[in-house]
Amino acid sequence: MRQLWQYLRNWAILSLLCLVLGWSLPAQAANRPNPELEQQVLQILRQHPETIIESLQAYQQQQQQQINQARAAFFNDLKTHPQIAIADSPILGITPAKNLIVEFSDFQCPYCAEAHKKLNQLLAKHQNDVTLVYKHLPLIPVHAEAMPAARASWAANQQGKFWEYHDALFTNQKRLGEDLYLEIAKKLQLDMDKFNSDRLLADTTISKDIQLAQSLGVDGTPFFVMNNQNFSGALQVTEIAGKLAS
């Protein structure tokens, strides 16, 4: 999915315009400069539109350099210090395994649900060669239930039931909502008081995953990192399978 990238790009352009015009976010209207000065600036921009284009290109190049550096550091951690990359994230499979796959996913993303099915088949076939690491990337601007579902799965993880809860969320993706979150927790025989209280504590960890994804330039879900390569999209699971088989 490309919605996240489009959202961030539009925000960057708006921020650049606000910077040029001397506005502040999010209260631009309250801090606009003198109308006459504003018109002069707009006139200059109309006469020299390349100014914005050049500024945006320079900004994008700078951002890409930062992303490349962050990816290089993350790839190095995967190779030499995998526990740093894993941190407190849920893992599936033996550790350490020959191949470490880091997945950034959103429980409301239909492409993630499709990838989930293929990943299960992949892991069953290569269960002795792969460790899967799950990172939360709820696309909050476009998926209203992504964050609540992530919180619920994090709470289940505190009782050792992340993957069972994870599978149930994807299986029942069309029913995402509070009733489902409680229903799954009860079926898994979780301590409900702890489950509900832990959901209130989940944001810190989830935010760290989101920040990591942003630093790596992840522009949608699902997104996979394996053996110093990244793969984007549910259909790319077949590429991962090809790499494992080679």
Image (spheres, rainbow, N blue to C red):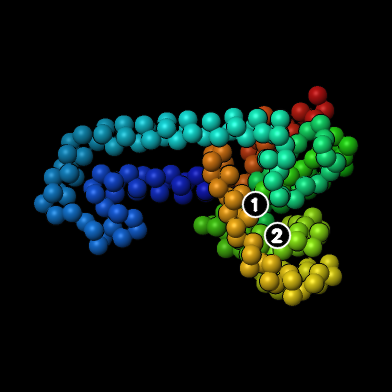
Residue 41 placement: quadrant: top left
Asked whether the residues under the numbered discs 2 and 1 touch, taking CB atoms below 8 Å apart as contact, a structural biologist would say yes
> Vertical placement of 122 versus 11: above or below?
above
Apparent side of residue 38 relative to residue 154 in the rendered image (left or right): left
| Relative height, residue 142 to residue 95 (above, below) | below
Question: Disc 1 marks which residue?
Answer: 136
Residue 185 screen position, x and y as percent: 78, 69
> In the rendered image, which residue does mark 2 sit on?
154
Q: Position of residue 150 (x, y in %)?
A: 66, 59
How packed mark 2 is, by other alpha carbons closer than 10 Å (few <14, some 14-19, many 20 or more), is many
Query: Who's the residue at 39% across and 45% down the image?
Result: 12
Outermost residue to the top: 246
Is 51 left or right of 184, judged from the image as shown?
Answer: left
- Residue 4: x and y, percent? 52, 48
Q: Quadrant of residue 133?
A: top right
Which residue is rendered at x = 54% and y = 44% of the image? 214
